[in-house]
Image (cartoon, rainbow, N blue to C red):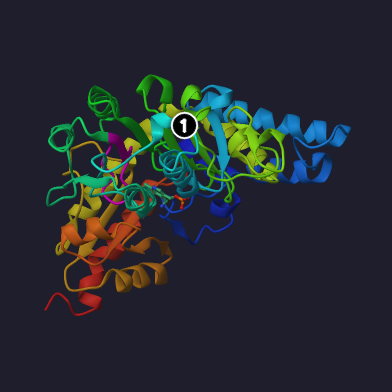
Amino acid sequence: LSDRLVADVRADFPGIAGRPERAYLDSAATAQRPASVIDAEAAFARTEYAAVHRGSSMATGEATDAFETAREKVAAFVGAGDREVVWTENATDALNVVALGMADASAGLGGERFALGAGDEIVVTEAEHHANLIPWQRLARRTGATLRWVPVDDDGLWTTDDLRAVLSPRTRVVSFAHVSNVTGLIAPVADVVDAAHAVGALAVLDACQSAPHLSVDLASLGVDFAAFSAHKMAGPNGLGVLYGRSELLDELPPARTGGSTITTVTMDEAEFLPAPHRFEAGTQPVTQAVGLGAAVDYLSRLGMDAVHAREADLAAELVETVAAVPGVRLVGPAPGSARAALASFAVDGVHAHDVGQFLDDRGITVRTGHHCAQPLHRRLGVTATTRASAYVYTTSDEIRALGEALGEVRAFFGADR
Ligand code: PMP
């Protein structure tokens, strides 16, 4: 995307074009939405809105078509089959659905291949978002399995060799982020999947920070399950996606049960539909699904390769800018190494929340805190960092403005004396 095209892209986003005084550098938390997404949701709400997969009215039929078309678009976008995309509340929910399904399998509720017990091991990394840690902690507690983790180094990084050192024939699940929301590390997914499969473990991918930014082909990456959120990829909030290989999804016990998930119900028991519907209990977020369909249309028009190339430039600019400020410690891959277009950093002598407030007062929106990755921050020896993250509408000028403001922050708080 050339600078000229980025100007056009910015015009597509009301939350960007309508707030020219603000540099929105918090897309890793939630991304702005283009008008085409907001309009698609509104058009659906105006003309086609009805319950889906319920009854036989024309209204239901139209809404169901829109809902299922959105599923097909999202599936195609990530290299999945239509039956391999399950709607969830968000990525957190999607990861919980996998872990809870495995807990149910362990309790004898079907899906024996997913049953865990004492002696089995679940492997994550020390850099995971809490969404990809706590569900596995709970699963381990419930089943007697052991949670193990790949330790990270002083910069928050890990390699496939580090992972291999933790794997064993007892490993049943390996769950890891494609892109870290704190360090920006891009995991070697295919290698990790191979290593997991070599010991007979399932590979679960947290694709929250990759699906919005990279061309992701889940089938060719070989992962068994994956999770991502609509709101980080120019879509609405309130919707996530669980991907699973269809033969796995058809066997995983559904964590949530109820209407729309079944074939036959008696007073004693229920038989569940095949995937994806067996997981979609209750009235579904149809408007959000239509919005996500429009979001992947928008991203596909830009072209994910072009998005990634543009973001690789922004990543380099971000890293150079942040690393050049005296007294600022950048975490994650060293300047010159590949990373996602986000930079988390600690400012010597100034708490991240003060840094965030200082930047906010200058119109620069960033995220501060532990970014739902407390163990990682503990390992890095800081309680909090400040994170600047870019998306398709981010400009070099915004990154320069960040650099200039950061250059003043320590003097402002008297931390340079
Ligand atoms: N994993 C990663 C890497 C994330 O960045 C996030 C969002 N910060 C999540 C999981 C959870 O996403 P959500 O809050 O949309 O469920």
**Residue at 24 percent of width and 35 percent of height:** 171
Residue placed farthest to the right in the image?
Answer: 57
Of residue 345 and residue 221, the one placed in the foreground of this image is: 221
| Residue 244: x %, y % from top left | 47, 30
**Residue at 57 percent of width and 50 percent of height:** 237
Q: Which residues are magenta?
A: 172-186
Q: Is residue 189 above or below residue 23?
A: above
Q: Is residue 278 above or below residue 49?
A: above
| Left or right: 292 in relation to 177 | right
Q: Is mark 1 within 8 Å of ligand 1?
A: no
Which amino acid lies under the numbered mark 1 shown in the image of this protein?
A: Gly
Give the secondary structure at mark 1: loop
Q: Is residue 309 above or below residue 124?
A: above
Quadrant position of the C terminus in the picture: bottom left
Q: Main secondary structure of the magenta part?
A: loop
| Left or right: 198 in relation to 95 | left
Q: Which residue is mark 1?
A: 111
